[in-house]
Image (cartoon, rainbow, N blue to C red):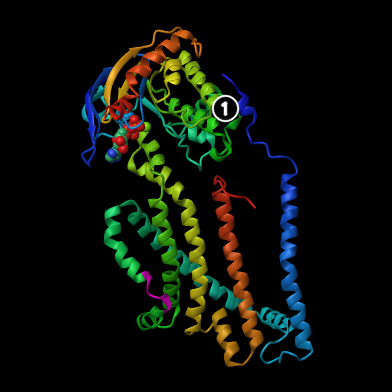
Amino acid sequence: MLAVQKVSRTFDNGYKAFKPVSFHTEQSEIVGILGTSGCGKSTLLRAIAGLDLGFDGEISFQEQSVRSGTEHTGVVFQEPRLMPWLTVIDNVVFGLKGNKQEKREKGARLLRAVGLKDTEKLYPRELSGGMAQRAAIARALVTNPQLLLLDEPFSALDAFTKMQLQELLIDLWETNHTSMLIVTHDIDEALFLCDRVLIFRDQPGVLFKDLKIDLQRPRERGSLEMAEYKREILQSLDLNHDVHVKSAI
Amino acid sequence: MTQTEVSHSPNKKSPGKKTTSSVNYIRSFAIGLIIPALLLIIWEVASRAGIFPQYLLPAPSAVISTLVALASSGELWTHVSSTLSRVLIGFFLGTIVAVVLGSFIGFFKPLERLFDPLLQALRSIPSLAWVPLFILWMGIAETSKVTLIAVGVFFPVYLNIVSGIQGVDRKLIEVGKVYNMSTASIITRIVLPASLPSFLVGLRSGLGLGWMFVVAAELMGASEGLGFLLTLGQNTSRPDTILASIILFAILGKATDAILKQLENRSLRWQDRYET
Ligand SMILES: Nc1ncnc2c1ncn2[C@@H]1O[C@H](COP(=O)(O)OP(=O)(O)O)[C@@H](O)[C@H]1O
Ligand SMILES: [Mg+2]
């Protein structure tokens, strides 16, 4: 499926966002990219999405290089990024081509799937943050992507809405089995959603650990096994690194 | 999956909200009329009592009867239509040039570096300074008048288009890129709608300047039009004619602006604005 080979990104100003990383993901897998802020997670995701082709190395999805097109990927950003002049349904079908009637039907179906049944004719300003992000998820799924990329999709939402949307994502996955790559800095979110977590750390970032999350679905938040995984992740993130350095001085 | 959020959706406007707001509107409109009405009454009374001399400040009733006389002789229509057509033609010409130039310069940064210094320099010339040159080049016929108006309309429209296009959220453009849209469809489907509010602001201030410039254009020599009426009133010592003409300018300016305002409201319904 997704193959990332020795990919790194050096910006024009000479700054390196992350050191060469390589990993593969499997069909239908939900993979988390977890790391502290500034370690290059968004930069990596933008490269995979084909939004930033200035990277070194090679990224391919189903044997096709992202440099030659990314029509099988959908993207959900941290902000909903809905077009404020379009109604919710027109936003959802924004990336679709073809017959108007078919587009409507498909958009309406996706709105139902994300729990936004009666909002077709509303404008984005009339939506709450959670509703807007639901619409953004519907927009990303409307083209039937085989890989869904999400960059901290729920980090701007309150704790309860966040949990609802995480559950929505799992519900959607259970019907479509779309592969997903989710950037997050929320360990609980990663543990609730992901089959595998890639742990990044340091600046420039390095891929420090590839951790398989062997938990049955539906997962129970706050279970003992999860707490165990969380401890392991916290240890590898080495958040106290700076503190050690300082106390040594 | 939960539906709770959806049931709280704000799409149902509370019944009666519309009627309350229109009652409020009428009320505030009526309140706004109190002072002008009082002033008119005082003016009328003072004129009749001979406090204001008729040859300097005629009574409102005298101005109205001048307007009625102009209207019944058919003269009024000639003046109004020639002024209105000058403004509209100049407005459209200025807008068209501004749209073409502004779109190109807004989209292509290098063009901005090439053109912008020149346009900024031209903008700093008070537009009335062009009058003698335009008369020299094009005579005092319609062409020079319309050109002057078009120049006045051009700048606000142009500046707003450029800043509107350049201010489009890069994040929205990225959404288009995610769907592998061509540059052309990114422009038509994202950049243009996103810069529409700014364009409409430019149109309205352009129209305002158009009205200002038509006065200047007609004062510099015309055989018909509201500006001609102004000069006529001055030369024949008829302040009622001058006042009638000023009132007509006010009405026409307000009416054309209201049309644009209506257009703005209709096409910007999606905007997150404080609604009054
Ligand atoms: N266009 C850019 N030019 C220069 N530096 C950048 C650019 N984009 C991001 N960076 C830098 O790269 C690093 C990684 O950024 P980012 O990928 O956004 O981190 P994360 O998403 O993990 O928080 C940051 O230090 C950021 O300042
Ligand atoms: Mg980020």
Q: Which residue is under mark 1?
A: A116
Look at the image and give the residue range highlighted in magenta: B123-128
| The one of B249 and B83 positioned closer to us in this rendering | B249
Using the rendered image of the protein, determine whether residue A217 is visible from the camera's viewpoint. Answer: no
| The one of A82 and A196 positioned closer to us in this rendering | A196
**Figure quarter occupied by ligand 2:** top left
Q: How many marks?
A: 1
Using the rendered image of the protein, determine whether residue B262 is visible from the camera's viewpoint. Answer: yes
In the shown orientation, is residue A247 left or right of residue B48? left
Determine the residue positioned at 31% across, 23% down. Answer: A200
Q: Position of residue A229 (x, y in %)?
A: 40, 12
Determine the residue positioned at 55% across, 87% down. Answer: B231
Helix, strand or loop for disc 1: loop
Question: Is B127 inside the magenta-drawn segment?
Answer: yes
- Name the kind of residue labelled 1 in the image: Leu
Quadrant assignment, res B71: bottom right
| The one of A97 and B132 positioned closer to us in this rendering | B132
Looking at the rendered image, the quarter that the N terminus of chain A falls into is top left
In the shown orientation, is residue B269 left or right of residue B43? left
Q: Is residue A157 above or below residue B241?
A: above
Count neighbours of disc 1 (C-alpha within 10 A) and say few if under 14, some if 14 to 19, many if 20 or more: many
Question: Is B220 inside the magenta-drawn segment?
Answer: no
